[in-house]
Image (cartoon, rainbow, N blue to C red):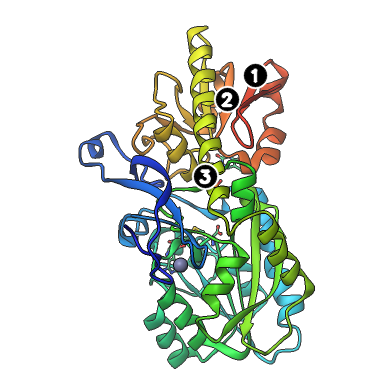
Amino acid sequence: MPACRICQTPFEPFLEFGEMPIANGFLTPEEVEDEYTYELSVGVCPSCWMVQLVDHPDPEQMFHDEYAYFSSTSEGMKRHFRGFAEWVIGDLLEDRQDPFVVEIGSNDGIMLRHISEAGIQHLGVEPSQNVGEAAVEKGVRTIFEFFDRGTAEEIVAKDGPADAILAANVIAHIPDLTSVLAGVETLLAPEGRFIFENHYLGDMLDKTAYDQIYSEHIYHFSLTSVSDLLARFDLEVIDVQPQPVHGGSMRYVVAHTGVEDPTPAVEQLRDRERSRGLDEPSTYKRFADAVQRSRDRLRDLLSKLRQEDARIVGYGATAKSTTVLNFCDLGTEHIEFISDATPAKQDKLTPGTHIPVKAPDSFREDYPDYAILFAWNHADEIMGKETAYTRQGGKWITYVPQVAVVD
Ligand code: SAH
Ligand code: TMP
Ligand code: ZN
């Protein structure tokens, strides 16, 4: 039996997806033969309630100099991180003399560029060289490293302690959380704040958003599991702020223990998680059953449409779609191609299912009958700019929270 990465308690997986490729491992036809796979399954620790993968690829296999996810591809995310940075500058750092900000997983500089433009001392820690270089071009000081205890010690020695450590959609990606939090403990100034946000377990369960489960998402956080984890360090959650991005996220504001009283929102969310059963195995069993039903419905819908000779394309070659496509066993017999605005993904094949990824021009030049929205978390932005598609009769297919055709 696998053991919890946080507290070593044995646990059983509640959901098994079978063999999976790396979620962002878009590939060329020549690379298909050697494609790497692993067994994707997820479980919950019956002691600290951390939801986690059983197995995963090595971080170096996922994050390297050809990483396919460029954060700034979505206008909505650019706005979100401008807002995040403005809150850090205007609120959090307001009274600090010559503050220093570190971001873990700074990607193409979507957030730190604003900190840099404000003339604030900063450092991005980003192991994927290609996306990190895009940040450097925006004036973001970046080191190409995996953040861990050792990196944190080097940063403190060179630059001193950090007034703010920021991390979006990255902490849940790091297998060795003990090393990360020991690093945060060391790097964070006595009065500093560690602010991280990730997709939120409660939303994933509510929306049957099983596509959040993929190679990079080693963990699925709740306040319950995060609090247990932080209590093992000189760190505690002092505020929680729900965020609408990535299908429902949670921002955790963390300080050294005892520095500031937690806001009432922390206790309220803790109660809410208890009442919705995040600490009950039956909750996860119900989710697993809903996932099986969702798969059957999506497969049935796409098969029926294809029997009617409808043309279906995908919209957004997301990491999330790798789980859906492989788990539902969908290939080019169902989906002609997937449109994506990221140059690094275009003219490649989707991991495992080998569906071609094409630039949005291909979608706009010859509209299909149906477009399945793999980037459902960006629905407003995408549907907002593709009104010409719907006006001429095109339909959207979604599967979160339910499989449905949207006119
Ligand atoms: N913060 C951005 C990027 C999220 S994608 C956003 O929210 O859009 C996750 C990023 O974390 C990738 O760029 C990846 O290279 C980086 N990453 C993965 N493991 C890391 C680690 N141990 N330390 C720092 N960055 C890491
Ligand atoms: P994400 O859901 O992980 O942020 O990934 C979104 C993907 O969708 C990413 O590859 C960029 C792509 N995308 C488009 O192709 N067009 C768009 O309008 C938006 C918002 C995203
Ligand atoms: Zn545990």
Looking at the image, is 287 positioned above or below residue 219? above
Disc number placed over residue 394 in the picture, else none: 1
Instruction: Tell me, for residue 285, which label it has, or none.
Output: 3
Q: Residue 331: where, in percent of width, then height?
A: 39, 25
Is the CB of the residue bearing disc 3 within 8 angstroms of ligand 3?
no
Please identify, in this view, whether the residue under mark 1 or under mark 3 is nearer the observer: 3
**Residue 337 to residue 146: above or below:** above
Q: Quadrant of residue 90?
A: bottom right
**Residue at (68% x, 41% y) in the render:** 381
| Residue at the disc numbered 2 | 371
Residue under the point 46% across and 43% down? 343
Indicate the amino acid at tag 2: Ala
The answer to the question of whether label 2 and label 3 lie on touching residues, with beta carbons closer than 8 A, is no
Quadrant of the picture in which ligand 2 is shown = top right
- The location of residue 148, given as percent across then percent down, is 40, 76
As shown in the figure, which amino acid type bears the numbered disc 1? Gly
Which badge, 2 or 3, comes first in the chain's sequence? 3
* Mark in the foreground, 2 or 3: 3
Residue farthest to the right? Answer: 264
At label 3, which amino acid type do we have?
Lys
Q: Is residue 36 left or right of residue 230?
A: left
Q: Residue furthest left?
A: 33
Q: Quadrant of residue 368?
A: top right
Name the residue: 63% across, 86% down: 192
Crowdedness of circle 2 by 10 Å Cα count: few (<14), some, many (20+)? many
